[in-house]
Image: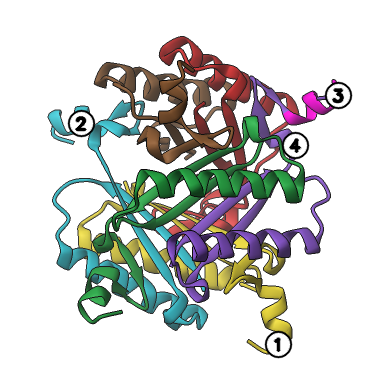
Chain colours: A yellow, B red, C brown, D purple, E cyan, F green
Amino acid sequence: MPYVNVKITKENLTSEKKKALIKGITELLQNLLEKNPQTTIIIIDEVETDNWGIGGETVTDRRKRGL
Amino acid sequence: MPYVNVKITKENLTSEKKKALIKGITELLQNLLEKNPQTTIIIIDEVETDNWGIGGETVTDRRKRGL
Amino acid sequence: MPYVNVKITKENLTSEKKKALIKGITELLQNLLEKNPQTTIIIIDEVETDNWGIGGETVTDRRKRGL
Amino acid sequence: MPYVNVKITKENLTSEKKKALIKGITELLQNLLEKNPQTTIIIIDEVETDNWGIGGETVTDRRKRGL
Amino acid sequence: MPYVNVKITKENLTSEKKKALIKGITELLQNLLEKNPQTTIIIIDEVETDNWGIGGETVTDRRKRGL
Amino acid sequence: MPYVNVKITKENLTSEKKKALIKGITELLQNLLEKNPQTTIIIIDEVETDNWGIGGETVTDRRKRGL
């Protein structure tokens, strides 16, 4: 019954990667905490780099500086 | 003053349905909990089926299997 | 499969009210959007009035002023 | 290390405004709470006016009425 | 730089389990998506069973029925 | 009408600091984005250090190491 929300910057995440991420987190919750995978919900939010700030600046600006 | 966030898969939700959902939840909070509708905020997030996992797989894959 | 998060101020919400709220939102999503109640998750967060701001002040301060 | 999520309606928010918002909130957390800006994350969600409800109606409908 | 929020029912989750969960998800994001663990934030919310609904009822009521 | 959620570790945040944080963010949104403070909602979540992970470990463990 867990609910997991993953927020990452929108930068070419493929469907295959999303599948692997969903499978991996679901299995982790099952193995570690015995949570039923049938009611484990994982939601991935891909956030534009303009809309993600860290260190007081946008990720867009960090990418320009090679970070 | 309540805040409600509804996350559903992005699958042809019409404006009319959204209006009805917002109206319905707002009324429920008013009737049940006497919450003021004027400061009740409802946000609907429509999530791509590739980005929603349940049962360890994406909803995209489940839809292909007829679920 | 929807996920709903309701945030309200922590002010004597009884178990009975919580049950009614969960039942009501689940039914609304079933009736309006044909969502399966068996995988509809509702999470209620009760937030201390010191931690909820509106109009630039805490709800604690608003309550003192009779709002 | 704080995490801040700002949700606003999607209505022509420029990159410059986003930068200023991220910078402003990060500085506020540093000045008020001595939080390290290097691990302060700010995420801005821009929500379609059809998907934002207040007062029991969508912001789209409110905008039509001049609100 | 990812942000992950895990919500689970509050039912005797030990500090050791929390550590393992945080470590596991952080490693998964590093291995799968090459995300920097130093800025990967994981927040675990433990939710009272009275405040978690699934299938239109609270988890408290489900537990009483042996589910 | 914005909604802002601030998550910080639970470490002796006073009511005065909370008031200042709520006031500061509300004013920032008003000054930068012309958002109406009367419908600006700010919610502060204080998270136990056991439940907050960064760098693959809990903040509890980091604090023990002087970080």
Q: Looking at the picture, does residue F7 appear above or below residue E52?
A: below
Q: Nearer the viewer, mark 1 or mark 4?
A: 1
Residue occupying image coordinates x 43% and y 46%: F18
Q: Do the residues indicated by labels 1 and 2 lie within the same chain of the protein? A: no
Give the residue number, with chain letter if any, for mark 1. A65
Q: CA distance from mark 1 to mark 2?
A: 51 Å
Question: Which mark is on residue E60?
Answer: 2
Does residue F22 appear in this view? Answer: yes
- Magenta highlight on residue C33: no
Q: Residues within 10 Å of mark 1 (few under 14, many from 20)?
A: few
Q: Nearer the viewer, residue A58 or B49?
A: A58
Residue D49 tag number:
4
Residue C7, image x, y percentages: 44, 34
Segment colored magenta: D59-66
Specify the amino acid type for callout 1: Arg
Which residue is farthest bottom?
A66
Q: Is residue D55 left or right of residue A41?
A: right
Q: Which residue is mark 3?
A: D66
